[in-house]
């Protein structure tokens, strides 16, 4: 079925289809199929058909991407527009650095914009917020092991500070647990987070959901978005158990490093997307007062 | 100062990606302008500056991780199926040899 879609797109292909579906909630099967197809066949890559990439401002102050003379469109057929110049430049750069073949699986910002524009699963902001809060129940940081003691200590030393930070910053109680049921998150905690998330616009929420799905943790995602953690730190904390095992058993570049860089790239893209979707630049001039 | 190294990191990535005419790219001009703009501040703890620095670090991480991920992908995962001895060679092992030939071979 996938190959027929590829053929259809090539035949009628004025529309450009970056093949990375969003990490959404429309079932694991389609995305894992796509994952396998992405990495195994040349059909998911297109030849580079343009020389120059530029941006231009369109109606309503939105920015568009131009590949040579043609305007970029989303997979859904809409005109690809972004709300500000910084995001437009970042997306244009993703297209600009492609060589010979277009590797859509490296164009994370483009994929996120496409998701936000097309919204293929028709999600509303409330749905995204509810899904994010539900994730808190299965947050990585909250699940602690009881053995081996090295890992227990590592989790305590590395995850507890982040937990303390978020509890203080948002004035909530989350806690952690080592049994299979997980922590009991009080309703007030979720309400506080819900209020906070309500201040994000749809694009920023799309990005945040992506980060949460990648890091498998709401706590770490907040840490990253609130600039308490860097991307490398957040990824390290998310993969803490794996890093522990790597130190014990050794590193396999083709698997461990590969996964780590991919996770870093996706998380960084999600974080950039959130920053750029909620940015507002203002220059304040201060008047010196005697 | 952390800002300089972050800036250099981003520039390095842009240079690797674009080659010699990296100074003409939109991204180079934008990043340069952002770093210049955030230099001028009277405040000791300028929040906007810290935010901009974090954003720059994140973007630098994005550029370098996509490049390294792609490199590892080309190295290990892009070649389709390979023979058993090639696969063994990837992790530094060799296939065992049996001097008399294997039992089922003539």
Image (spheres, helix red, strand yellow):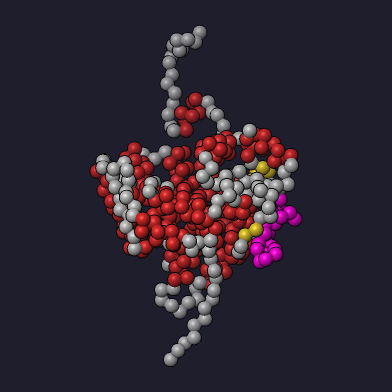
In which quadrant of the rendered image does the C terminus of chain A lie?
Answer: bottom left
Q: Which residue is at the front of the view, A32 or B86?
A: A32
Q: Which residue is at the front of the view, A125 or B36?
A: A125
Which residue is most to the bottom? A290
Residue A169 belongs to magenta span:
no
Which residue is most to the left? A149
Question: What residue sits 62% from the left and 60% below the top?
Answer: A82
Residue B20: tell me if it is visible: no
How many tags in the picture?
0
Which residue is most to the front? A187
Q: Name above or below for residue B39 compared with residue A34.
A: below
Question: What residue sits 67% from the left and 57% below the top?
Answer: A65
**Residue A63 figure quarter:** bottom right
Residue A64: tell me if it is visible: yes
Residue A68 belongs to magenta span:
yes
Q: Find the magenta span and give its range.
A: A50-73
**Residue A224 figure quarter:** bottom left
Question: What residue sits 63% from the left and 33% below the top?
Answer: A1
Which residue is most to the top? B106
Relative to residue A225, is residue A86 drawn left or right? right
The x and y percentages for residue A148 are 26, 41
Q: Name above or below for residue B79 compared with residue A129.
A: above
The x and y percentages for residue A155 are 30, 49
Relative to residue A191, is residue A3 drawn left or right? right
The x and y percentages for residue A236 are 39, 50
The x and y percentages for residue B43 are 43, 77
Question: What residue sits 53% from the left and 61% below the top?
Answer: A201
């Amino acid at each position: 079925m996938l190959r027929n879609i590829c053929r259809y797109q090539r035949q009628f292909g004025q529309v450009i289809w970056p093949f990375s579906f969003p990490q959404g909630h429309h079932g694991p099967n389609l995305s894992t199929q796509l994952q396998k197809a992405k990495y195994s066949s040349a059909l998911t890559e297109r030849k580079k058909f343009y020389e120059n990439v530029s941006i231009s401002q369109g109606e309503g102050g939105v920015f568009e991407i131009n590949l040579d003379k043609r305007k970029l469109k989303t997979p859904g057929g809409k005109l690809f527009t972004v709300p500000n110049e910084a995001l437009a430049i970042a997306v244009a750069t993703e297209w600009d650095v492609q060589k010979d073949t277009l590797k859509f699986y490296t164009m994370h910002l483009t994929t996120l914009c496409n998701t936000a524009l097309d919204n293929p699963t028709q999600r509303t902001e409330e749905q995204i917020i509810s899904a994010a809060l539900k994730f808190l129940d299965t947050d990585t940081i909250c699940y602690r092991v009881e053995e081996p003691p090295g890992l227990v200590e590592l989790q305590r030393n590395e995850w507890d500070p982040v937990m303390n930070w978020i509890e203080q910053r948002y004035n909530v109680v989350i806690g952690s647990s080592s049994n299979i049921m997980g922590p009991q998150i009080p309703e007030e905690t979720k309400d506080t987070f819900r209020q906070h998330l309500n201040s994000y616009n749809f694009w920023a929420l799309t990005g945040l959901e992506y980060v949460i799905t990648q890091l498998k943790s709401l706590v770490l995602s907040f840490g990253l978005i609130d600039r308490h953690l860097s991307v490398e730190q957040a990824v390290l904390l998310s993969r803490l158990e794996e890093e522990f095992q790597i130190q014990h058993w050794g590193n396999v570049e083709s698997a461990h490093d590969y996964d780590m860089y991919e996770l870093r790239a996706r998380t960084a893209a999600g974080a950039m997307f959130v920053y750029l979707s909620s940015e507002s630049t203002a220059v304040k001039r201060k008047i010196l007062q005697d | 100062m952390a800002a300089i190294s972050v800036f250099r990191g981003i520039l390095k990535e842009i240079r690797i990606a674009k080659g010699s005419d990296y100074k003409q790219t939109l991204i180079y001009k934008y990043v340069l302008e952002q770093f210049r703009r955030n230099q001028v501040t009277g405040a000791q703890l300028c929040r906007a500056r810290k935010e901009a620095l974090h954003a720059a670090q994140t973007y630098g991480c994005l550029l370098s991780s996509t490049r390294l991920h792609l490199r590892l992908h080309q190295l290990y995962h892009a070649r389709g199926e390979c023979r058993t001895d090639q696969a063994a060679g990837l992790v530094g092992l060799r296939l065992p040899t049996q001097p008399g030939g294997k039992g089922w071979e003539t």
